[in-house]
């Protein structure tokens, strides 16, 4: 009888019923889990300010900067509450909010990113294993400690030289054009893969291209995934396929080395030799390192070159600095600049380029947008400094970097790219500028030493080898770097295509 009645329904009616059932399921999953906020939690933003029933504050995902900064400005304490799906989030601002966010031991870094930054791949370990985050930090710290990194410097310089020469002009009378957000980004990828990956990959241009493409597919983030974690999306499917390809590639490499006894002098061999050749851990290390460094370092290194091309004063300073280092270490007139740079020690790389350091520091301030994430995983409510408010247990906390880095109280004319802000004699006349570009408090960047080294090598090498200018994709010279989109999370590609026109230095 029931089947007979169903057969009489039109297909449209059936789809309406199915859709209604799905909507009911979604609503019940979310509304049941929303609880009234405890007294003392920062107040919720008003419904008219973009807080939608069930879905929450969608503007947080689509227009993060203006959403965060406008509500910080409206709040008496600098803190406020909102929902994104079922997740209660506390937006923090001001000095008290910043201190709490970066210094509280009760706010967990990995738990925050696992839920609120869906572009990050996550891997779970068995219950009896060491937490993957603890293992990752410990292992990466060991792999990039000074003595290990020192041995890699000549190879990193050689790799950079090879990649920069690939499409370079052959004589001073010729010119070439590159998209720095492709070529410099790929160079950072190669340096990172050489430092944390496998020789079979970084020695194969084909595998380098494939794995980079898979890695970029892993970055697909979706707001739906945060709101409806039980609902599969197209982004989830592409990420799952890309992750599977990377997994089976690394699994094959590990098993082949163990089966044949073949060895390589590379990071993968180090993991196998120390007993950490488990494929899940290898993937977590490779992908975690790439996510931590490639997305930001690849884009920021490209932007440093773009800003130098449109800022003659700093272009000349950096060029003079690089030339001075080369001349000071040149053993004979026949040595090329790149041959000289390859002889520099790790300590010399870290201490010989203060102007490049200022340029990358200002570029990170300028281009690292969006929020950072934490979750209160403790059994207590975390006080927000002396404001009288707190972050409830189980809630998330977010802090927008522009609240600090684009605050005119600390950085006059924040839209202006000015590395001179960080000249030591300027900082000596006032308190040091507050800066969180490399993390701070309880979560400094584990890979900061390596990330800085990558940028130093690329910028010094490019400036030593070439003279260059900035233009758009219509070959029109540019006198300024176009404004960037400050809505997304993290460093992002330029809104309009940028090109470097370069020629060999004579």
Image: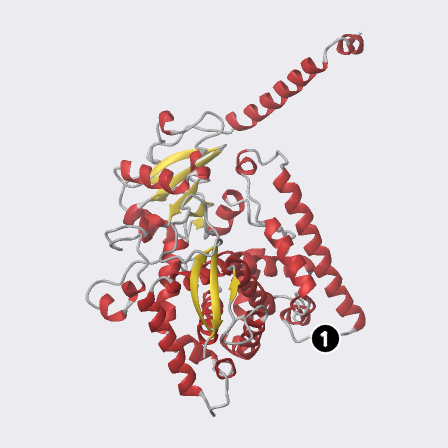
Q: Is residue 275 above or below residue 413?
A: below
The figure's colour scheme reads: secondary structure
Give the left or right position of residue 415, taking residue 270 as reference: left
Residue at screen point 47% across, 57% down: 475
- Tag 1 secondary structure: loop
Residue at screen point 33% across, 41% down: 69
Compare residues 429 and 280 and report the one nearer the observer.
429
Residue at screen point 45% across, 43% down: 379
Give the left or right position of residue 94, taking residue 269 as reference: left
Residue position for label 1 = 263
Q: Is residue 403 above or below residue 424?
A: above
Residue at screen point 73% across, 10% down: 9
Residue 162: x and y in percent read: 58, 73
In the picture, which quadrant includes the N terminus? top right
Give the left or right position of residue 372, taking residue 210 as reference: left
Query: Image quarter for residue 364?
Result: bottom left
Query: Image quarter for residue 15?
Result: top right
Compare residues 191 and 475 and report the one nearer the observer.
475
Residue 485: x and y in percent read: 42, 46
State whether residue 440 appears in this view.
Answer: no
Crowdedness near tag 1: few (<14), some (14–19) or many (≥20) residues, C-alpha within 10 Å = few
In the picture, which quadrant includes the C terminus? bottom left
Residue 102: x and y in percent read: 38, 53
Compare residues 280 and 347 and report the one nearer the observer.
347
Compare residues 107 and 118 and report the one nearer the observer.
118
Q: Is residue 439 above or below residue 88?
A: below
Residue 241: x and y in percent read: 69, 47
State whether residue 190 appears in this view.
Answer: yes
């Amino acid at each position: 009888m029931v089947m007979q009645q169903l057969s009489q329904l039109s297909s449209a009616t059936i789809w309406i019923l199915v859709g209604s059932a799905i909507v009911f399921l979604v609503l019940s999953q979310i509304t049941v889990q929303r609880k009234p906020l405890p007294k003392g939690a920062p107040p919720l933003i008003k419904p008219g300010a973009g807080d939608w029933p069930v879905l929450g504050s969608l503007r947080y995902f689509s227009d993060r900067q203006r959403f965060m900064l406008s509500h910080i400005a409206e709040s008496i304490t600098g803190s406020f509450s909102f929902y994104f799906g079922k997740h209660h989030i506390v937006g923090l601002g001001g000095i008290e909010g910043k201190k709490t966010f970066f210094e509280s031991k009760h706010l967990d870094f990995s738990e925050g990113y696992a839920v609120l930054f869906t572009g990050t791949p996550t891997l779970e370990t068995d219950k009896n294993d060491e937490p993957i985050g603890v293992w990752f930090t410990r292992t990466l710290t060991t792999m990039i400690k000074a003595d290990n990194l020192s041995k890699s410097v000549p190879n990193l310089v050689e790799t950079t030289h090879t990649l920069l020469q690939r499409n370079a002009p052959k004589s001073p009378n010729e010119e070439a054009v590159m998209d720095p957000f492709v070529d410099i980004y790929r160079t950072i990828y190669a340096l990172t893969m050489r430092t944390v990956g496998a020789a079979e990959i970084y020695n194969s241009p084909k595998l380098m291209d494939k794995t980079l493409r898979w890695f970029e597919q892993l970055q697909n983030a979706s707001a739906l995934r945060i709101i409806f974690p039980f609902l599969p999306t197209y982004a989830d499917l592409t990420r799952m396929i890309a992750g599977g390809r990377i997994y089976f590639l690394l699994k094959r490499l590990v098993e082949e080395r163990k089966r044949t006894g073949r060895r390589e002098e590379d990071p993968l061999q180090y993991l196998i030799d120390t007993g950490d050749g488990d494929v899940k851990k290898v993937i977590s290390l490779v992908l975690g390192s790439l996510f931590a460094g490639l997305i930001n370092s690849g884009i920021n290194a490209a932007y440093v070159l773009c800003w130098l091309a449109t800022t003659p004063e700093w272009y000349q300073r950096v060029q003079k600095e690089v030339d001075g280092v080369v001349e000071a270490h040149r053993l004979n007139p026949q040595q090329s600049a790149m041959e000289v740079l390859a002889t520099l020690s790790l300590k010399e790389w870290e201490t010989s380029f203060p102007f490049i350091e200022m340029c990358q520091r200002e570029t990170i301030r300028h281009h690292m947008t969006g929020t950072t994430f934490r979750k209160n995983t403790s059994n207590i409510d975390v006080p927000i400094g002396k404001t009288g408010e707190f972050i409830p247990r189980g809630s998330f906390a977010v802090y927008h970097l522009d609240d600090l880095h684009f605050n005119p109280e600390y950085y006059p004319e924040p839209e202006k790219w000015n590395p001179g802000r960080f000249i030591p004699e300027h900082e000596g006349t006032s308190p040091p500028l507050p800066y969180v570009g490399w993390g701070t408090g309880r979560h400094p960047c584990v890979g900061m030493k390596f990330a800085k080294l990558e940028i130093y090598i690329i910028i010094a090498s490019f400036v030593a080898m070439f003279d260059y200018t900035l233009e758009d994709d219509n070959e029109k010279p540019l006198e300024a770097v176009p404004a960037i989109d400050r809505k997304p999370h993290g460093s992002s590609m330029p809104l309009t295509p940028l090109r470097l026109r370069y020629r060999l230095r004579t």
